[in-house]
């Protein structure tokens, strides 16, 4: 029962709902809060019985969405105290926690958990009329890379809703207009998803072969750059440690004043911390690049779920697509022509036109 509620909360987040919206929906559906649930099952809790057992707090929803435990991990050292006299517990940064994977049955898949964290890190803008789009946070200008801003002219007429380049709206001289109606965008994305899933259904082996080669080439190039940067950072960190020892000895021997030592040591320390953060980020990116082939298998499995898809639901969109880039409209032919480019989750761009042309040849 509790697992089903957790899955539902993650599902609603995948649909683009925020913690407040999720909390309100759970209240409408008369779902017991975590405290009320524990009390109803005779479990101990430090929290007092709530006045309304169904009134969820958005913080409780956020806490559930952040819990790595639901992916089958055991997480130790989530909190810490400053001293044995400090009774207040503080949240420990993730990098200082001890995480042990696959220690119990998972409730949420890793890719869903990661996608939810990505969704929550994005800002979903609502219009002045209180509307939002399933595409919010996912649409980018193909020319300048800025996020496309969602807007509407009438709160009752969804057909007029649109996206446009946020940089163009701020300063029209820096980027062209990339205006596209949401209805047009939705139709284009749905059509492309249908073609991709149909192609995988009919030509799965060839799709795997082509994407493996594409990802291998892309990963090799990225890994070369990342590993060079990692080596440079590690070398500089080692140099900084030697420099610190040198100025420490000079300070002890009276060759370097205390003020000068403090200034230099603070500078070295700040640079070292920044480099160590970069090293951690680069190492994580290297792991991602080395696991690219696994992404093909995950995507193929997801694609099979959406064969013959007829409606682009928020969940389907978030599960399949990571970003959409919109070109500026081209009117040189006398007609308004506008292209979009879809980055699929874990794969990037799929050369669908080339794949389909190959099969027809």
Image (spheres, grey):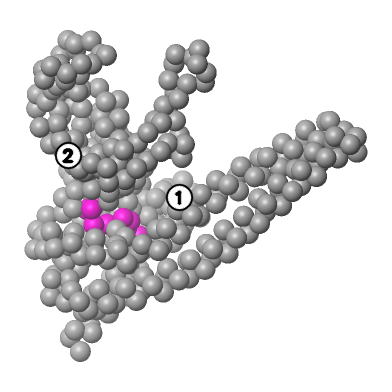
- Helix, strand or loop at disc 2? helix
Q: Dividing the picture into quarters, in which one does residue 69 lie?
A: top left
Disc 1 crowd, CA 10 A, few/some/many (<14, 14-19, 20+) = many
Task: List x then y, in percent, for residue 173.
Answer: 50, 55
The furthest residue to the bottom: 361
Of residues 215 and 199, the one drawn nearer to the viewer in this rendering = 215
Q: Of marks 2 and 1, which one's residue comes earlier in the chain?
A: 2
Tell me the quadrant of the picture where the N terminus can be found: top left
Task: List x then y, in percent, for residue 315.
Answer: 19, 48
Of residues 223 and 69, the one drawn nearer to the viewer in this rendering = 69
In the image, the segment drawn in magenta is 317-326
Q: Dividing the picture into quarters, in which one does residue 268 lie?
A: top right
Disc 2 crowd, CA 10 A, few/some/many (<14, 14-19, 20+) = some
Q: Residue 167 — which label?
A: 1
Q: Is residue 324 magenta?
A: yes
- Helix, strand or loop at disc 1? helix
Instruction: Evaluate if marks 2 and 1 touch, with contact meaning CB atoms under 8 Å apart.
Output: no
């Amino acid at each position: 029962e509790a697992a089903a509620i957790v899955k539902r909360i993650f599902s609603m987040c995948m649909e683009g709902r925020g913690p407040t919206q999720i909390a309100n929906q759970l209240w409408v559906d008369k779902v017991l809060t975590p405290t009320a649930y524990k009390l109803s099952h005779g479990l101990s809790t430090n929290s007092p019985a709530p006045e309304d057992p169904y009134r969820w707090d958005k913080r409780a929803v956020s806490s559930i969405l952040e819990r790595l435990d639901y992916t089958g991990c055991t997480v130790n050292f989530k909190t810490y105290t400053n001293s044995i006299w400090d009774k207040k517990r503080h949240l420990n940064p993730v990098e200082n926690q001890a995480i042990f994977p696959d220690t119990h049955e998972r409730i949420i898949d890793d890719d869903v958990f990661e996608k939810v964290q990505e969704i929550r890190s994005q800002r979903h803008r609502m219009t002045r009329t209180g509307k939002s789009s399933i595409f919010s946070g996912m649409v980018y200008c193909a020319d300048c890379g800025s996020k496309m801003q969602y807007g509407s002219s009438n709160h009752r007429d969804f057909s007029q809703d649109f996206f446009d380049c946020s940089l163009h709206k701020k300063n029209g001289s820096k980027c062209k207009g990339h205006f596209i109606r949401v209805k047009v965008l939705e139709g284009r994305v749905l059509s492309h998803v249908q073609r991709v899933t149909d192609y995988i259904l009919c030509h799965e082996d060839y799709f795997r072969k082509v994407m493996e080669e594409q990802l291998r080439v892309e990963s090799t190039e990225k890994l070369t750059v990342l590993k060079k940067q990692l080596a440079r950072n590690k070398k500089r960190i080692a140099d900084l440690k030697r420099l610190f020892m040198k100025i420490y000895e000079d300070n002890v021997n009276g060759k370097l004043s205390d003020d000068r030592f403090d200034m230099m040591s603070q500078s070295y320390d700040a640079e070292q911390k920044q480099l160590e953060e970069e090293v951690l980020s680069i190492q994580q990116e290297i792991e991602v690049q080395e696991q690219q082939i696994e992404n093909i298998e995950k995507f193929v499995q997801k694609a099979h779920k959406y064969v013959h898809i007829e409606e682009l639901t928020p969940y389907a969109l978030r599960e399949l697509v990571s970003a959409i880039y919109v070109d500026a409209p081209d009117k040189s032919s006398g007609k308004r022509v506008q292209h979009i480019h879809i980055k699929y989750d874990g794969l990037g761009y799929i050369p669908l036109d080339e794949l389909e042309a190959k099969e027809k040849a």
